[in-house]
Amino acid sequence: MLLIQTNRDALLKPLQAVIGIVERRHTLPILSNVLIEKNSHGLSIVATDLEIQITATSECKEEAPDFAITVAAKKLQDICRAFPESAKIALESEETRLQIKVGKSRFNLQTLPAIDFPKLSSSAENQSVIKMGQNTLKKLLNHVQYAMAQQDIRYYLNGLLLVIEPGLFRVVTTDGHRLSMASHPLDEQEIAAQKCHEVILPRKTVTELVKLLHDTDEEITIEISHNQTRFLFANIVLVSKIVEGKFPDYNRVIPTNYQNHIKIERATLLQALQRASILSNEKFRGVRLVLTQNSLRIICNNNEQEEAQEELEIGYDGDALDIGFNVNYLLDVLNNLADEAITLSFGDANSSGLITVPDNEFFKYVVMPMRI
């Protein structure tokens, strides 16, 4: 039975949007499949890993009956990508198989019943609804996502804290060694339900959003309920479960009374750190920042007693200071900011470092020192 005949991209584009969460090896075989549905809204493709669900829809102008079928995601993607953009793809079903026809090419894939596909149920009540530009949310996520923990036993650190405050949208991440926080002011038009709210999004949700969001002013709607968060933008709906747990009090981590500050060009510091880190210890990746009158020296050593040293002229008349950091933590933040200048603030050699952006109160990055 012919299900549909359509352009290659009507299948491939929504498939590429959802395939990032498809589990190739899973105890439930159907999670390796995508659900393909045709209804009055168009042609939609759904993928889930039971924590996240992404639905991508494309217009379907072809006359075709409604249907639902599941098929191996990776195989379908590989087949679609193997043909030119102008190709017409026909999908036909026959018992437990899906036949894909392109010209004189034929592919027969196994299917599983669509009724068994484990869709995430929609939450009945949205407690907060936020609207903003896709580029705004993508910028916020890029400012903090690198500081998420990876496979930490404190599972709530393996994600991102999303905070709704009166007039403010905030995202925070930490792995216990550094913390990154970025905020965006909200006006009355951007927030429909002015409720204070805190939820923790899984790491996978954040990485998928960063991939899917576009650098445009097109609107994204964020709906937050007690057990899930929904992101609606373009032709995509991403539904994510919320991580249970208590996120650390980030306000206590951010220093407020530092007296030693240096303002420096971000690119200049980034390049100096990249050069110096060539000779850093591969295991510990430590770098020393030595501050003296109008001078910043960057020093890296390794196990072979080799040393790299960079010296930068800066405007500084504070206390002399010799402090060590993990160079990767400094490179991460500098690579993910786009601002021309940054401000580094210090207490003493045993206190954390604070990185901010001049004339921008909405970004803060705290990094703990290390002994070198």
Image (cartoon, grey):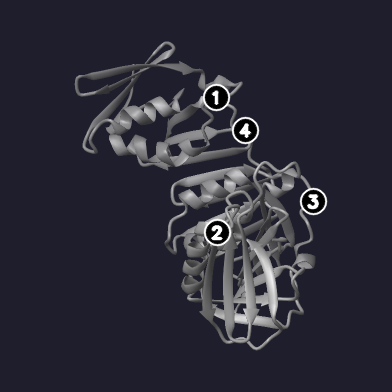
Identity of the residue furthest to the top in this view: 95
Distance in Å between CA atoms under marks 3 and 2: 44 Å
Q: Gap in Å between the C-alphas at discs 2 and 1?
A: 45 Å
Q: Is residue 242 visible?
A: yes
Whichever of labels 4 and 3 marks the residue nearer the N terminus, that label is: 4
Residue type, numbered disc 3: Lys
Q: Earlier in the sequence, mark 1 or mark 4?
A: 1
Crowdedness near tag 4: few (<14), some (14–19) or many (≥20) residues, C-alpha within 10 Å: few
N-terminal of the pair, mark 1 or mark 3, is: 1
In front of the other: label 1 or label 4? 1
* Residue for badge 1: 25
Nearest to viewer (mark 3 / mark 2): 2
Which is nearer the N-term, disc 2 or disc 1? 1
Residue type highlighted by circle 2: Glu
Residue 85 placed where, x, y %? 24, 38
Residue 19 percent location from the top left of the image: 46, 36
**Residue drawn at point x = 42 percent, y = 62 percent:** 216
**Which of the 4 quarters of the picture holds residue 218?**
bottom left
Labels 2 and 4: the sequence-earlier one: 4
> As drawn, is 29 to the left or to the right of 227?
left
Q: Which residue is mark 2?
A: 306
The residue that mark 3 highlights is: 246
**Three-letter amino acid code of the residue under disc 4:** Leu
Residue 57 in the image: above or below residue 212: above
What is the crowding at mark 1: few (fewer than 14 residues within 10 Å), some, or many (at least 20)? few
